[in-house]
Amino acid sequence: MTQRRENGGSGLPFGLPGEGPGGRDARAAATVHALSIDVEDWFHVLDCAGAPDPSSWPLQPSRVEANTRALLQLLDAYGQRATFFILGWVAEHHPAVVAEIARHGHEIGSHSYGHALVSSQTPGEFARDLDRSLEALHAAGAPRVECFRAPGFSIGPNEAWAFDILASRGMRMDASLFLSRRAHGGWPLARRRPFEIWAPGGARLMEVPVVPFRLAGSELPWTGGGYLRLLPKQALLTLLRRASHADEPAVIYLHPREIDPTQPRMALPAARRFKYYVGLDGVEDKLRAMFTAARFDTLSAVADATAKDPPLVLTRRAA
């Protein structure tokens, strides 16, 4: 597959050449980016011995309702919409937060029930966890659930079987692919926009992936999580602007805990502690700057309005 040339001018990651009126500026102004929020509590940490055991989750002091409400107020203030991928466990234990998200007019998706990596599950375990998640979401008042994001973006080439299971449960959209290598897998693909997945068993889903910034053969993830906390605000705004000029909607992702600098601290290893906690006090300011600079909408709305890249056909070798 031939990859389009992405960057013009100097090609420097934190500087853009000037643009005249019309042309790329017009496309940039029209580009609507996707905003997604993975609704977890502060103790829902993947693959880490220092995190509370799931059996103790009900005993932990919860902050997910207050933090989610703060995000809803922020979105209302800037007139932005988002897709909220909610853990079934959160929906079961804090159903009010699901109903409140729905009342604010945002899209609701599943983030699994128990926050387990897909790569750690058998197809049967994955299906049962998904079913439990959907049951909890519907019981809490979610009007319709048709999209899914795997914990840790943990669907890679070895977990392609998950797409047929998702489709069998009514999912029409997935947002689990991280298009670069990462700790929990990743799936490097030469795609920049939403695309269809043609699953091995014949199902078809729309994929809205997380796309890294690519420069001189290297990859820079930037759109969420630790990257959102650690990158300077001006770098984030420049990268958002570059995506707009290329008419490639960015998929921003974050968690309610990332606007909560005073959340409880877990006994994590030094590297994980740095990755998990540094930069928390600057996230809300960065979000306000991004919401001022660009329009955001749900993943479904952005996928519906965006030109698609070629499908990923899993009945033969992926591109």
Image (tube, helix red, strand yellow):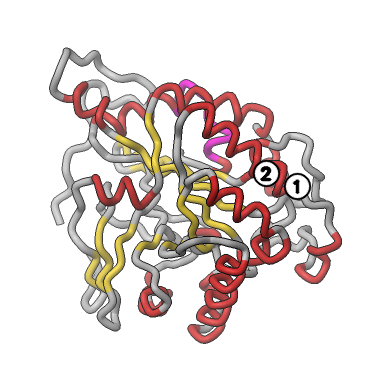
Q: Residue 251 carries which label?
A: none
Name the residue at 35% across, 52% down. 300
Name the residue at 60% across, 55% down. 98
Is 112 above or below relative to 293?
Answer: below
Q: Which quadrant is home to the N terminus?
A: bottom left
Q: Residue 244: x, y in percent?
A: 29, 31
Q: Residue 191: x, y in percent?
A: 26, 52
Kind of residue indicated by mark 1: Arg
Query: Which residues are the magenta region?
Result: 227-236
Q: Is residue 158 visible?
A: no
**Residue 230 falls within the magenta-colored stretch:** yes
Name the residue at 40% across, 23% down. 293
Task: First in sequence, mark 1 or 2: give its number.
Answer: 1
Question: Residue 81 versus residue 100: which sits nearer the camera?
Answer: 100
* Quadrant of residue 137 within the rendered picture: bottom right
SS for callout 2: helix
Q: Residue 284: x, y in percent?
A: 60, 29
Name the residue at 33% across, 47% down. 301
Question: Outermost residue, right direction?
Answer: 59
Q: Which quadrant is home to the C terminus?
A: bottom left
Q: Residues within 10 Å of mark 2 (few under 14, many from 20)?
A: many
* Quadrant of residue 252 within the rendered picture: top left
Q: Residue 63 carries which label?
A: 1
Kind of residue indicated by mark 2: Arg
> How many numbered discs sit on the rendered protein?
2
Magenta-drawn stretch, dominant element (helix, strand or loop): helix
Q: Residues within 10 Å of mark 1 (few under 14, many from 20)?
A: some
**Residue 166 falls within the magenta-colored stretch:** no
Question: Residue 306 versus residue 119: which sits nearer the camera?
Answer: 306
Q: Residue 257 carries which label?
A: 2
Q: Are marks 1 and 2 in contact (CB under 8 Å)?
A: yes
Is 116 above or below relative to 28?
Answer: below
